Image (spheres, rainbow, N blue to C red):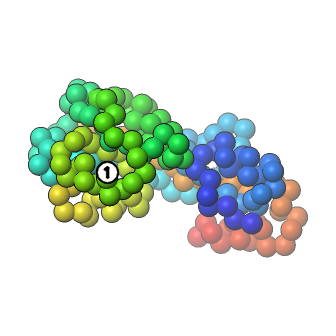
Amino acid sequence: TLDLSVQSAVEAARAIESLRADIAYFYALEEPAGLSSRYGWSEQVNLYAGADHPLARAGSVSRGDLTITPQLAVDPRNGLRPIIDAALARGGARLGPVMLETDNMFDIITALREGAGCFAAFGPMARDLGRMSGIRRLALDVPLPAIEVRQTVNERSLSRPGVQALADFLFL
């Protein structure tokens, strides 16, 4: 069984230990202790704001600029929130107060376009935001850390035909 629903190393470990999954992918800032995994690829974390926001028009955005900028964020219960928050913290990007917390992307996009603050994203979400009219990626003076996509395989499943072959194939 391949589990693509987990987000964190903790969730991946639970899926593997409970035998709910033979193979799981998860997000991390580095290889987690206590969970054998291999690095797949990295997704850069970026910050976005409405095209008319002062930071979107700036040639370079400092960490100091971010501390006075309101934050738009996914809901705290969203599995992506902890890894995004950890990447922001590791990158020294302390944002202003959270003005909106929701998983409704229409609300986030509307708030961005209205200049309500900035929003951190990575992966397909970041790619899509970067292509939208009225939204710009902030030109940070120092990039934020990348988030790793990692694969873990249940050691007990390796005796079953095809599990290692599938794990290797998915890594091509």
Report x, y in % for residue 97. Answer: 31, 29
Can residue 71 be seen from the camera position used here? yes
Residue drawn at the location 65% of the way across and 72% of the way down? 169
Report x, y in % for residue 50. Answer: 19, 50
Q: Residues within 10 Å of mark 1 (few under 14, many from 20)?
A: many
The residue nearer to you, when weighing 113 against 3, is 113
Whether 159 is drawn above or below 79: the answer is below
Position of residue 96 in the picture relative to residue 42 (left or right): left
Query: For the residue marked with disc 1, what is the amino acid?
Result: Ile
Report x, y in % for residue 99. Answer: 31, 36
Residue drawn at the location 33% of the way across and 63% of the way down? 128
Instruction: Report the residue marked by disc 1.
Output: 108
Residue drawn at the location 24% of the way across and 63% of the way down? 132
Q: Residue furthest right?
A: 159
Residue 32 occupies quadrant: top right
Position of residue 97 in the picture relative to residue 42 (left or right): left
Residue drawn at the location 44% of the way across and 36% of the way down? 85
The residue nearer to you, when weighing 113 against 8, is 113
Whether 42 is drawn above or below 60: the answer is below
Position of residue 53 in the picture relative to residue 38 (left or right): left
